[in-house]
Amino acid sequence: MSDPYLLARARALRTVPIPADRAELTRLRRAVDDVERRLVDVATPDGIQELMTGWAPDVEPASGALGDSDVHRTASAIRLVTLACCIRHCWPDPSQPLYPGQPAAQEDVIASLAPLQDALAPQEGAAVLGQTGHFLKALRFLRACGYLSADAGDAMIRLGPMVALWSERDVAELRSGYDVLPAPRKE
């Protein structure tokens, strides 16, 4: 069987038995890699382990419709800047791997974000939320989404498992823009 045939078969059947022949498994892996897919181990309802093709972690299929909110997800500036600041604090050396990074004190992250408050926070809501409430809310959201680890009650921020899934291309982009990430405040 040719590589494209193996891929077409896997896509058409949705799940396929794990090939016993290592060469066939290698060809299937090569075929999915060629079209920015990945193989995912799945268990059928009767407990048999099979393979399924899925999108590669760094590929998000598009519907082709502009403004399709189910495809194009946007985050608020506060959430993005908060994540950027957490990354910079938890990843002090960009020559090292991004994940898992190191813990950073939440108060240090918030202190680095405070100077950005006026530019990011809606003025009418700032008084109600307090000076840093919107950043704390962003931290809770980022934890809930897995970009930051769950709060362990020690006032430390840790990068979460979603960051571990980022592609090398994404991490390379972060490295190239490392100097513009909100840095820890100088003492």
Image (spheres, rainbow, N blue to C red):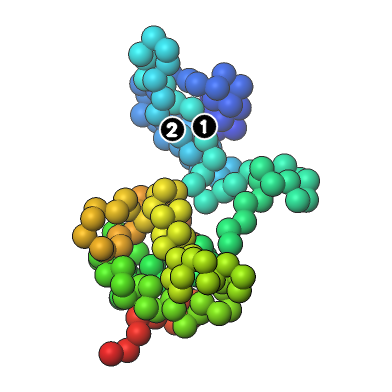
Most extreme residue toward the bottom, as rendered? 187
Relative to the observer, which residue lies in front, 2 or 167? 167
Residue 34's place in the image compared with 76, above or below, is: above
> Looking at numbered disc 2 in the image, what kind of residue is underneath it?
Val
Residue 153: percent from the left, percent from the top? 23, 55
Front residue of this view, candidates 156 and 57 = 156
- Is 74 above or below relative to 104? above
Q: Nearer the viewer, residue 71 or 41?
A: 71
Residue at horizontal 39%, vertical 20%?
Answer: 43
Give the mark nearer the N terminus: 1 vs 2.
2
- Residue in view at x 55 percent, y 79 percent: 118
Name the residue beneath numbered marker 1.
53
Q: Gap between marks 1 and 2, in whole Å?
A: 6 Å
Res. 174 in view: no
The front one of 5 and 160 is 160
Q: Which SS class for mark 1? A: strand
- Left-right relation of 17 to 98: right
Write down the quadrant of residue 19 in the picture: top left
Q: Residue furthest right?
A: 65
- Identified at 31% across, 72% down, the residue is 107
Residue 154 drawn at (x, y percent)? 21, 60
Q: Position of residue 185 (x, y in %)?
A: 35, 85
- Amino acid type indicated by mark 1: Thr
**In this rendering, is residue 49 above or below 176?**
above
Residue 182: image location, x then y, percent = 44, 78
Q: Are marks 1 and 2 in contact (CB under 8 Å)?
A: yes
Farthest residue to the top: give it: 46
**Number of the label disc, if any, that sits on residue 40:** 2
